[in-house]
């Protein structure tokens, strides 16, 4: 908006009362907006500061052990977050693994389909997927998706991939309703709209010349996408993935309903797990407000938000760069 | 810029065409895969939840465990209270931040504010809850609706800011210049010309933020706690629809579980109406401002 003109004010203007009143209005509005905007920045700083203050006792007491110990025992004031970190990493990795190819495909589809009557509804529907509250995903996942997956997918995986030498430990079946695979699948559904939207934006900025050049050389649609579109959009797609990863790491409710909230670390994806957001949601209200437990939970919140904000910032920079390359 | 790198040896034209067709088929498959959960979720929620809808569902409060009947009146009231206050906080904050970014913001501060607004969109909602718990709940020594509203404000403020800034930028500069040329002071130009012109776009932004607020569970869990009875005092623990769905879904009682589905229908209906309404409004706005 740098081209917006400033209100003309020269030294010849007489300082009439009317004029002064007008200028006061200006300083009031601009002053208020500046103040509130600084407030937004202060909100972020305050959030980090408050969490850091709350987390300090636990981080000081346990040090690195906090991240490497498996012992989470509030009764005896022992806090090691490794099981939660493990569960969060596994479920988010699964989510990205499933969601990335589908999202990129979807973004290419939305970009390729030229007919408006098909593209617009599809775009709206993908957006609606993003609008569904996570507790509704959780409810549906708990009563519909998880029973279905436990009945069909889990035995099938155990019987096929579970027999292979290296992969077998990943697919040891357990009788538990909740498991990390189910949580990863629900997470994948939830982050598809985010990765798709950003990827689409990036793909839309790939110069037409490039595609046309590929077409003119006789490339098929597949070849032009592989040789012209995807290389150009690569860093943007990485950015989109990071944004999706940030969302997956922080997702609380649906995951907590599907993962089984089981302590311990299991290599099997068909075994229950626990995530950082889920432990915060489940233990926060019960923790005694002066104790070490709250501090440990706030430390986990701090770790979570630090990673999520870092991913968001990195993603924004990558997407920006990718888009600038296009124009 | 990456140059085009054709493969060293080309396969036959028929093979390449078939490969391309198969690829296009795969793209369509991803579209189908993405649509399946959407259809299934909406379908299941409607089928399982609609029968629960009745007068009692909206007027009665939580039933005792294992007892038939009851409803979610206290949750509907609570969600209204929490989201209402949250919206009252976040709309002025969000819109004024957007006005700063679009009308006044220059230089480093504007860059920083825009960047912060964007990355705050990625704050995990549970973290917003933990933050407000540490600030508000511990100082007031009580869980409360207002703490929930403030937690929602942390999430809704950046949403409204980003969406409103975009819509303010659609307002043609000609309008601004015309107003200034007529001697209208800048603040009046903003309040009387820019904001009304962007009006429906701002409404869109607010609707999207409210939709998000309705559905948030995790931050409310840590700040408003929940309540089995109707509460209208913002300083007391308060229930919310998503919170009830969360607890009831994980309970062992079938009556509670079916109430959860009823809550899901109401929640989904509200959120989808707001999202689709926002979409229609913004399409119309974009066509109008070109």
Image (tube, rainbow, N blue to C red):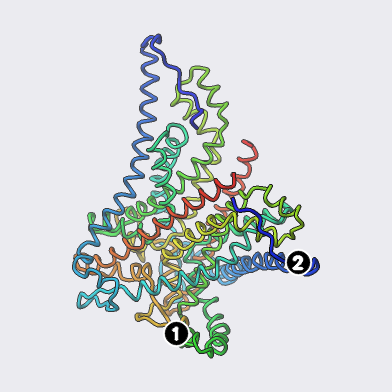
Quickly name the residue at label 1: A176
Residue drawn 71% across the image and 56% down it: A113
- How crowded pointer 2 is (Cα within 10 Å; few <14, some 14-19, many 20+) is rated as some
Vertical placement of B15 versus A150: above or below? above
Work out whether residue A19 or residue A10 is closer to the camera in this orientation and state it. A10
Work out whether residue A29 or residue B52 is closer to the camera in this orientation and state it. A29
Q: Which mark is residue B92?
A: none
Quickly name the residue at label 2: B16
Q: Are both tags, 1 and 2, on one chain?
A: no
Q: How many marks?
A: 2
Question: Could you tell me which secondary element the residue under label 1 belongs to?
Answer: loop
Q: Which chain carries label 1?
A: A
Alpha carbons under labels 1 and 2: distance apart: 47 Å
Q: In this view, does A219 lie to the left or right of B266?
A: right
Residue drawn 31% across the image and 53% down it: A47
Residue A60 image point, x, y percent: 19, 65
Q: Is residue B144 left or right of residue B30?
A: left
Q: Which chain carries label 2?
A: B
Residue drawn 69% across the image and 55% down it: A119
Work out whether residue A246 or residue B284 is closer to the camera in this orientation and state it. A246
**Image quarter for residue B151?**
bottom left
Residue drawn 49% across the image and 68% down it: A187
Vertical placement of B73 versus B208: above or below? below
Residue B118 image point, x, y percent: 44, 49
Question: Could you tell me which secondary element the residue under label 2 belongs to?
Answer: helix
**Image quarter for residue A292?**
bottom left
Residue A231 image point, x, y percent: 60, 57
Residue A320 image point, x, y percent: 51, 48
């Amino acid at each position: 908006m740098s081209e917006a003109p400033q209100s003309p004010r020269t030294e010849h203007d007489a300082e009439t009362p009317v004029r002064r009143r007008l200028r006061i209005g200006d300083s009031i509005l601009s002053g208020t907006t500046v103040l509130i905007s600084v407030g937004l920045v202060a909100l972020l700083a305050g959030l980090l500061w408050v969490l850091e203050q709350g987390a300090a006792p636990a981080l000081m007491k346990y040090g690195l052990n906090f991240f490497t110990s498996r012992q989470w025992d509030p009764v005896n004031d022992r806090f090691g977050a490794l099981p939660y970190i493990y569960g969060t990493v596994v479920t988010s990795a699964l989510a990205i693994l499933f969601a990335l190819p589908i999202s990129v495909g979807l973004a290419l589809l939305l970009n390729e389909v030229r007919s408006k009557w098909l593209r617009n509804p599809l775009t709206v529907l993908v957006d609606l997927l993003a609008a569904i509250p996570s507790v509704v995903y959780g409810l549906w996942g708990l009563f519909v998706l998880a029973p279905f997956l436990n009945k069909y997918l889990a035995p099938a995986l155990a019987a096929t991939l579970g027999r292979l030498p290296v992969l077998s430990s990943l697919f040891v079946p357990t009788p538990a309703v909740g498991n990390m695979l189910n949580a990863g699948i629900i997470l994948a559904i939830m982050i598809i709209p985010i990765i798709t939207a950003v990827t689409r934006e990036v793909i839309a900025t790939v110069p037409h010349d490039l595609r046309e050049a590929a077409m003119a050389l006789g490339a098929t649609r597949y070849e032009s996408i592989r040789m012209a579109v995807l290389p150009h959009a690569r860093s943007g797609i990485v950015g989109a993935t990071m944004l999706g990863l940030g969302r997956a790491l922080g997702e609380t409710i649906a995951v907590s309903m599907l993962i089984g909230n089981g302590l311990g670390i299991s290599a099997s994806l068909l075994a229950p797990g626990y995530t950082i957001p889920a432990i915060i949601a489940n233990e926060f209200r019960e923790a005694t407000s002066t104790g070490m437990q709250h501090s440990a939970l706030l430390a986990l919140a701090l770790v979570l938000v630090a990673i999520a904000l870092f991913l968001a910032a990195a993603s924004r920079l990558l997407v920006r760069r990718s888009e600038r390359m296009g124009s | 810029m990456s140059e085009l790198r054709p493969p060293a040896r080309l396969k036959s034209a028929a093979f390449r065409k078939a490969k391309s067709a198969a690829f296009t088929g795969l793209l369509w498959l991803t579209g189908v895969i993405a649509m399946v959960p959407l259809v299934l979720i909406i379908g299941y929620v409607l089928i399982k939840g609609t029968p629960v809808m009745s007068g009692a569902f909206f007027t009665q409060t939580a039933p005792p465990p294992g007892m038939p009947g009851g409803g979610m009146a206290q949750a509907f009231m609570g969600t209204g209270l929490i989201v209402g206050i949250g919206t009252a906080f976040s709309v002025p904050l969000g819109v004024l931040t957007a006005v700063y970014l679009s009308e006044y913001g220059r230089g480093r501060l504007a860059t920083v504010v825009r960047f912060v607004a964007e990355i705050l969109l990625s704050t995990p909602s549970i973290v917003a809850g933990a933050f407000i718990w540490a600030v508000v709940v511990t100082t007031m020594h009580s869980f409360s609706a207002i703490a929930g509203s403030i937690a929602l404000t942390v999430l809704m403020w950046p949403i409204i800011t980003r969406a409103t800034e975009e819509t303010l930028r659609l307002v043609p500069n000609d309008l601004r210049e015309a107003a200034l040329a007529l001697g209208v002071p800048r603040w009046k130009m903003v309040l009387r010309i820019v904001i009304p012109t962007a009006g429906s776009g701002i409404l869109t932004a607010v609707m999207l933020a409210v939709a998000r607020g309705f559905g948030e569970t995790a931050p409310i869990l840590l700040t408003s706690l929940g309540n089995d009875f109707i509460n209208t005092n913002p300083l007391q623990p308060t229930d919310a629809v998503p919170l009830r769905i969360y607890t009831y879904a994980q309970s062992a009682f079938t009556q509670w579980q079916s109430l959860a589905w009823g809550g899901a229908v109401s929640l989904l209906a509200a959120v989808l109406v707001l999202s689709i309404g926002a979409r229609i409004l913004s399409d119309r706005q974009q066509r109008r401002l070109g």
